[in-house]
Image (cartoon, helix red, strand yellow):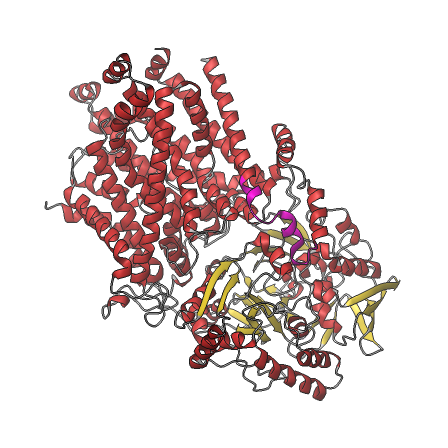
Amino acid sequence: MTVSILRRAGHSLLVVILVSVTAVGLLSLAPGSVATVILGENATPAAVAAMNTELGLDQPLWRQYGNWLGRALGGDLGTSPLTGQDVTQAILDRLPVTLELSLLALTLSVSLAVLLAVLSAAAPGIWLDRVINAVSSAFLAVPAFIAGPVLIYLFALKAGWFPVSGWAHIEDGLGANLRSALLPALAVSLTEIASFHRLLRTDLIGTLREDYVAAARAKGMPRGYVMFRHALRPSSFSLVTLAGISLGRLIGGTVVVEILFGLPGLGQLVSASITARDVITVQGVVVFVAVTYVVVNMLVDISYGFLDPRVRKAARA
Amino acid sequence: MPRNPRTLAAASVLSAGLLLGACAGGSDAADSQAQAPQGEAVKGGTARIIEDAEPRSLDPAVIANSYANSPILGNALYGELLVDNPKTGEIGYRIAQSLTTDDGGTTFTLKLRPGVKFSDGTHFTAAAVKFAWEHVKDPNTNSPDLPQAALIKKVTATDDSTLRIELTDAVPRFANAVLQTSLNWVARPQSLQSGTIDTAPVGAGAYTLEQWSRQDVIKLKKNPGYWDTEHVNLDALEIRAVIDPDQRWNTLLSGGADLAMEGQWQNVDNAQHNGFQNQTLDFGGGIALVLNTRKPPFDDVRARQALAAALNLDTVNDAVFNGTGRVPDTLFDKSSTFYQDIPLQKNDPAQAQKLFDELAAEGRPVSFAVSLFPGSSALGNSIQTQLSQFSNVQVKVGTIDLAQYGTIMAKKDYDVITSSVTFGDPEPRLWFGLNGRSSGNYSGIDDPRLNASLDQGRTAHDDAERTAAYRSVQERLAELVPVIFYTRASPSVLAARDVGGITQYGFGSVLPENLWIQP
Amino acid sequence: MNLSTSPPRPRSPFAAPILRPVRKRRPVLVGAAYAWLALVIALAVLAPWLPIAGYSVPAGASRLSPGPGSVDLLLGTDSFGRSLLSRCIHGARVSLLVGTGAGLAGLAAGTVLGLLGGYLRGRVDRLISLITDALLAFPPLILLIALSAVLTPSIEVILIGLTLVTVPNFVRLSRAQAISWSSREFVRAARNMGAGSARIMTREVLPNLLPALGSFLPVVVAALIVAEGSLSFLGLGVPPPRPSWGGMINEGKSALATSPHLVLVPATVIFLTVFSLNQVGDHLRLRFDRTL
């Protein structure tokens, strides 16, 4: 077990390095540099060259990367040449927004999906199940860039229940904070609801066919009790797994709603930095997101190995 | 299968929802523009303000003192040397006590108000002004106000409160160059040198920085040491930059802000129809398609005339601004003393086609690219759609990559870009936009008669002479077509009904110290 | 971005019976989905020969609401007076080209890599897994935004970017299937009879992979159409005047309050197409994915 965990960790480290190399390589191919962005239209070639030297951008790419990697392994992601902000600090400033958005979207998706899945698995094939399935399939076809403008129009402009844009921090009150987060979270969670529902429904139907469930029913236990006690519990594990993976995906995937709703999250930071060729910041954010993704996956894997006897047995065999 | 219709209906529940919501829209336009609240200014409270752009740094030189950027932020942090009344052009003195010339505009003397202090308690000195202006003038600062700063040849602090300014040429209306730009804002030099300008900027404004979260909010609180502190009303300001115009309007409409700087006619129109306050300055010139006259195809005046004749600007207005824009027929606004009824261009498709054909026959076909900033694709689409009706003309639309903007402008590597040539008094902005010697002349037009007329408008002492000079500018402009103005600018402030004390000066800048909110 | 709507674990998302209706088929809905897709594909292919206005020329006044009268004005006009019907049809060319192009390219590359990794195992497998995991860990939309900064947005660039995003999903699916098929008796038998690896992979394993992989294609195409829409929505899609559905929503969203059809028409088209592709995908998987 230890060996496999170590191997897994080594693999993950390589993955993260590969991701950061790709990020640097990609942006170094892009025309223009952060020096021209800072100096603007009045820049003389000499001034651009001087600025490049000052920022260390005249060194060979591998050396720039090496320097960065050395510091990054020590936890220092560098300083943005564009804004003079410490990148780690910039990420920590933005993370609460993206994280809260992702967690809220996840909570919404899971709770709605559980409700829908229980309703549809209770009596598969009847009209309720079919309606829920259709709605769920419909949700799957509503990407955030469609859901966003429509939600803004209906619930922020027409109904006036939510702010149109901007972010209220938790310090300003939980109510205001949730109000500013709910619409964007809903916009990204529609497709997640659908995928959670699909998985959970199949899972539940499968479990409900197991012998022990039939036995429980035969003992006269109430239907609802059996559903929650015997069927939902085993399924909840795969739901947790799915939630972990979904979280990893959401943290890097809220760009559209952050821009649409004007939220100061990681997505806004990275897209603004790409436009300005702020390689240091892009690198920092991309690596941060990749590490999150990898760590979540690794934890899911490892915990799965520990918790599910079938996997443990299979690993030994 | 009897149940299938129901399933189908359920599947389309979403699109049905969309349609229902949509049908409810667009009918509740209450055509009413609000008046400012009456009575005495109220002290206290926090204003939530929207500006149109977030500065890269709080260095005053890069904040930009214009309606389309973040003028309230600059005024709040750094105060103002001068202000003006945009309607009359009359200069008002704030931190500066006087700005005088005794040789017709080549040398000036700036006197500072005694006793003004920076927010850290140190004295506001002439040396600080000198440092600030030289900082704006340094090309490496990349200040948008470089053309104005470049008018300055030399500044000398003759004593703590007096500054002697030598200009490169006679510019009698130099005060406009100061109060329309970041030359109006002075930070404590030490704050710029030590690199703490973004975390703890030190200025002499009515407010100081409490917190700046990028792409989020800038929180400012009242500066108790401000020179005019008894006239400051609000306790705190919360400034957000909202770049997207729809988001800006929606935020104001839904009560997410008290006041918004605005540069889009559509939002001005929205405000007028929904019971919001609106103040808009009537400026001349406008936002223009700038044709690069240094290279083909627009080095040929016929190509420029053809494009101007081909475009129906009312159609552009309809497409881009939903018809709310104001298409300039003449260079000056009717409210200006220099207004002459000399039409800038005339929509004449037949003439345009004739010119396109003529140029193509000579082997010089009109084929060009329009380079636009991200977010203004509607303009490109409109031009493309209109020109699709003509033959022998080809247009591509490209988006300017921000990282390449500097290089593109330095190399003059464009056929058509959009730029603002907007002015209240034509001095000095009109000169910058069209004079052959100006670095802000993006069309590169360098016409002796146009140059001479602009110079004359600059140095002339009486209004009759200026009027004659600008008449000549207008005639020449209509002949040469280096730029096609497609809308007037809309230097506006929109605000909820309860906001008082909205005062604009200069290039649509707003004074935060005058604002108040009715409780 | 919705390329992996279901989890790679506990069971591989692609091998997993994601939707197993108890009643095996829902003919009308699935039939309608096939019909819609057929209609969209037919219109897209035939677009240049259809009696409709061009996508870049005005067909009437601006922002006309949908209404009968002429074919071109059936779905109304946009801010420039261009026919929304024509733009939807020509936009379908972009969406379908990008979606299927990148989907097929991803399918091809992913199948080969997954097959190599899953059959050969060892170092090859580790290397391929490394690359796959790295691609999966790179936030897809950020990768696409960065790519469009490197190269001027065009159909080719979007194709390359979307292919990159698709490959790892197919690698995972193909690898899992290759591992499972490689342990079957007939594969072992072929090996015992002295067949080479290349022969076994192409003759024995590959044919068994393709149905499952192919039946996954519609769902991927749906995800790719959404991804292209997101890019166009951010203004990084195909350059004007060429229409794309996401771009149309982007152009129309400022008029949502006054002329909602500018957004609703392309939004409905995207919705129906993605919905249909998902339905067809589920249907195909039920029929062709033998692991179900």
Q: Is C79 a magenta residue?
A: no
- Residue located at (19% from left, 24% from top): A209
Vertical position of residue A61 compared to residue B74: above or below:
above
In this picture, which residue range is highlighted in magenta?
Answer: A26-44
- Residue located at (68% from left, 40% from top): A56
Vertical position of residue B60 compared to residue C205: above or below:
below
Chief secondary structure of the magenta span?
Answer: helix
Q: Is A43 a magenta residue?
A: yes
Total count of labels: 0
Residue situated in front as seen by the camera: B480 or C224: B480
Q: Is residue C105 left or right of residue A167?
A: left
Vertical position of residue B466 compared to residue A163: above or below:
below
Q: Position of residue A49 (x, y in %)?
A: 70, 47
User: On the rendered image, what quadrant is the C terminus of chain C found in?
Assistant: top left
Q: Is residue B89 left or right of residue C215?
A: right
User: On the rendered image, what quadrant is the N terminus of chain C found in?
Assistant: top left
Q: Is residue A73 visible?
A: yes
- Residue located at (49% from left, 81% from top): B346
Q: Position of residue C174 (x, y in %)?
A: 33, 28
